[in-house]
Image (cartoon, helix red, strand yellow):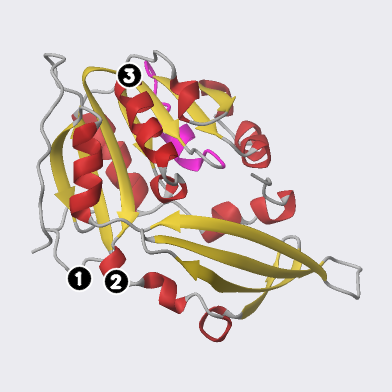
């Protein structure tokens, strides 16, 4: 895939600051007594560094070299091992916890999603946990990704930025492709530069995700409709998952659940 523009990467942390999501992952790491943590799709490493407490081994993995360049430059980066790559880079980590934050799970499309879950299973120690979130397709969030609804202009650290989203396709299997349009006028420049980025997110419901996790051999621990572990309902905009590799090494069974 094409990498992100480094100038837009500089804005990522301001646009996506730590909040209840980071609180959830940090709390879960403490709850399960995690000593070895893998942050898959770590991006700029804001959460990754926060997880790197004393006596922990933390690895941040991301396919974006520009994201990892920023991650490696942040305070505390020396406490983390950074790897450019995808789930295959987990290897035999014997991790106590693997996390996927910031919609990472939705960026893993098609068969790559099933390979990622298999890689995570292999990378977890028996009893180790996986935690991630996905947007609930029932909320149909992509319907707001239009020029009219997303257009904005703002001053940033890299110049004046005009931005909007445009959905290009909605697939029958739930894959939503869209274009991120950015017009950046850098300081001292008069003419904006167009920076266009393309992405696809997989919108899968709770039944399908739970089945995928179970098929990979992981057993469900909890599914919530928000970062504060609110009960999951049909209208919850977010689905938060916690699963575990069975201690006995026997692959778990699929636990199908329907939104309430």
Magenta residues span 44-56
Q: Residue 203: which quarter of the image?
A: bottom left
| Magenta-span inclusion, residue 46 | yes
Q: Residues within 10 Å of mark 2 (few under 14, many from 20)?
A: few
Residue drawn at 21 percent across, 39 percent down:
242
Give the quadrant of the C terminus.
Answer: bottom left
**Residue occupied by mark 1:** 235
Mark 1 lies on a secondary structure that is loop
Residue 129 position by quadrant = top left
- Disc 3 target residue: 122
Callout 1–callout 2 Cβ contact below 8 Å: yes
Residue 187 lies in quadrant: bottom right
> Residue 22, percent across and down?
36, 46
Please provide percent x and percent y for residue 41: 48, 38
Q: Which residue is mark 2?
A: 139
| Disc 3/disc 2 C-alpha distance (Å) | 33 Å
Left or right of 142? Residue 8 is: right
Q: Residue at x 15, y 23 (%)?
A: 251
Q: CA distance from mark 1 to mark 3?
A: 34 Å
> How many neighbours does mark 3 have within 10 angstroms: few (below 14), some (14-19), or many (20 or more)?
many
In magenta segment, residue 50: yes
Percent position of residue 76, x then y: 54, 29
The number of discs equals 3
Q: Is the Cβ of the residue at disc 3 closer than 8 Å to that at disc 2?
A: no
């Amino acid at each position: 895939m094409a990498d992100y523009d480094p100038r837009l990467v500089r804005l990522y942390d301001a646009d996506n600051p730590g909040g209840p999501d980071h609180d959830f992952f940090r709390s879960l790491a403490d709850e399960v007594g995690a000593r070895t943590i893998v942050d898959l799709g770590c991006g700029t490493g804001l959460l990754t560094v926060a997880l790197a407490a004393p006596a922990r081994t933390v690895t941040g993995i991301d396919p974006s070299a520009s994201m990892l360049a920023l991650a490696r430059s942040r305070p505390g980066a020396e406490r983390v091992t950074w790897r450019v790559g995808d789930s295959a880079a987990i290897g035999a980590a014997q991790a106590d916890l693997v996390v996927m934050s910031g919609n990472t799970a939705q960026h893993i499309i098609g068969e790559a999603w099933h390979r990622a879950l298999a890689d995570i299973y292999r990378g977890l120690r028996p009893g180790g946990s996986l935690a991630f979130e996905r947007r609930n397709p029932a909320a149909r969030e992509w319907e707001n990704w239009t020029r009219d609804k997303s257009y904005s202009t703002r001053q940033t650290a890299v110049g004046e930025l005009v931005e909007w989203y445009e959905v290009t396709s909605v697939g029958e299997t739930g894959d939503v492709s869209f274009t991120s349009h950015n017009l950046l006028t850098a300081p001292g420049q008069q003419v904006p530069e167009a920076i266009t980025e393309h992405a696809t997110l997989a919108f899968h419901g709770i039944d399908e995700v739970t089945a995928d996790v179970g098929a990979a051999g992981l057993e469900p621990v909890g599914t919530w409709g928000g970062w504060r572990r609110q009960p999951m309902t049909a209208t919850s905009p977010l689905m938060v998952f916690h699963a575990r590799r069975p201690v006995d090494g026997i692959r778990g069974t699929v636990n199908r659940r329907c939104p309430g």
